Image (cartoon, helix red, strand yellow):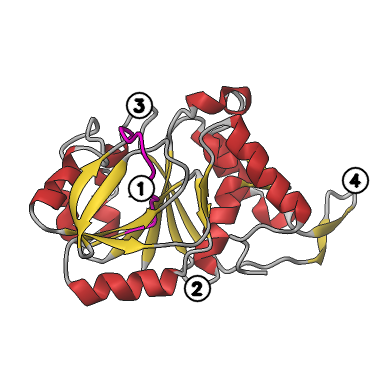
Amino acid sequence: MKTVILCGGLGTRLSEQTYLKPKPMVDIGDKPMLWHIMNIYGAYNFTDFILATGYKGEVIKEYFLNYYHFQSDLKISLKTKEVQVIKKHPIDWNVHLVDTGSNTMTGGRLLRLKDILKNETFMLTYGDGVSNINIKKLVAYHKSHGKIATVTAVKPIARFGGMSFDGDKVVSFKEKTQTSEGWINGGFFVFEPKVFKYLHGDDTILERDPLENLTKDGQLMAYKHEGFWQCMDTMRDRDVLNELCESGRAPWRIWE
């Protein structure tokens, strides 16, 4: 199963970092946020990734073009330019980098991947959030209910949009309007190909009409994750994640 990671946004609330690099490439510990997210999926043997790039996408391309050498010890002859890999750090990922436009919205980025995803169930998440979510349980839950979409619902501090439920069926989806604590969109979606019927052009914002219309049609289900989840919206968020890494208490590093 393929995993789409949205990597193309401007990251304006992290402008101290994102004027040089896209948000998913901001370091947490000594690795980019994107690396951490991919390892969450990799821990459950989901290793086929599509990165929907946009703003400063060349930084992401350069990272993966040089990944093998960056993660290995090298012996280099400056005379012959021969490069010998002394210690390898192999990682079994397939990474498809797709330029989805600098100004394309989240739903538009996904729509641009339609021909690549074809008629397969796929996963999608944002390039700025980590969790100790069990991806295999998420996928199993999605397969069990037979609806078009599953969103992972999480409960962080109350400064995001919220959802309400009838059982596990989403009956209300509002993005970033909440003023009291509750369940919010934590990313880590699973979609059936029918989701593309809800997407219309580059200006489509996934979190607005598509998810709201899926909700109206009874096609959006919630996988409720009560464990750790943290996004990186601001410098404060980045600092929190860095502190967890430095202390050795990073709950999302389930692959270690």
Tell me where residue 28 sits by quadrant: top right
Residue range highlighted in magenta: 176-189
Mark 2 = which residue? Answer: 44
> In the image, which is nearer the foreground, mark 3 or mark 1?
1
- In space, the residues marked 2 and 4 are separated at their CA atoms by 41 Å
Q: Earlier in the sequence, mark 2 or mark 4?
A: 2
Give amino acid for label 2.
Tyr
Residue at left offset 39%, top offset 28%: 102
Q: Earlier in the sequence, mark 3 or mark 1?
A: 3
Q: Earlier in the sequence, mark 2 or mark 3?
A: 2
Mark 3 = which residue? Answer: 103
Tag 2–tag 3 contact (CB < 8 Å): no
Give amino acid for label 1.
Gly
Label 1 secondary element: loop
Mark 1 = which residue? Answer: 182
Give amino acid for label 4.
Leu
- Which disc is residue 69 wearing? none
Query: 187 above or below 232?
Result: below
Residue at left offset 66%, top offset 53%: 67
User: Counting other residues with Cα less than 10 Å from the Cα at mark 4, is it few (<14), some (14-19), or many (20 or more)?
Assistant: few
Q: Going by the picture, which residue comes out furthest to the front?
A: 180
- In space, the residues marked 1 and 4 are separated at their CA atoms by 59 Å
x then y, percent, for residue 107: 26, 41
Tell me where residue 175 sits by quadrant: top left
- In space, the residues marked 2 and 3 are separated at their CA atoms by 32 Å
